Amino acid sequence: MPATTRRIGTCNEPATTLVEGRSQIDGGLAYGPLETLVYACDEHGHTARTEWIAPTLTPFTAIAEPVAGRQCGDATDLT
């Protein structure tokens, strides 16, 4: 399935954080495939991890992925 892009929220600040949403396995004790990427500004980083990532996914803050050219609230679903 191709990746789809969507917007979350109304903030248009430049993104400074990338939060990965990974599927949960073993009752949430481990994580599986990457399912979504959510970009956030400094102000909305916590919101991205706690509200913008589906509760069925485990959020991880990624630091290696570049966020240049992304806005707060940009999301890419990979599944």
Image (tube, rainbow, N blue to C red):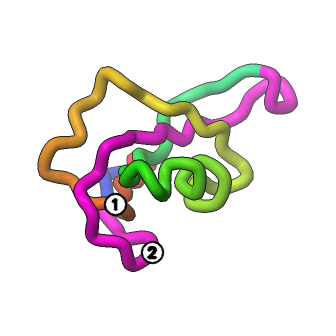
Q: Residue at x 66, y 52 (%)?
A: 50
Location of mark 1 (residue): 72
Residue lying at 38% horizontally and 63% vertically, measured from the top left: 73
Q: As drawn, which residue projects farthest toward the front? A: 43
Q: Residues within 10 Å of mark 1 (few under 14, many from 20)?
A: many
Closer to us: 52 or 28: 52
* SS under mark 1: loop
Residue range (magenta): 5-29
Does the stretch in magenta take in 26?
yes
Quadrant housing residue 12: bottom left
Q: Is residue 75 above or below residue 61?
A: below
Write down the residue under mark 2.
9
Q: Residue at x 49, y 49 (%)?
A: 45
Coordinates of residue 72 in the picture (x, y in percent): 34, 60
Could you tell me the amino acid type at mark 1? Cys
Question: Residue 70 appears at what percent x and percent y?
Answer: 21, 53
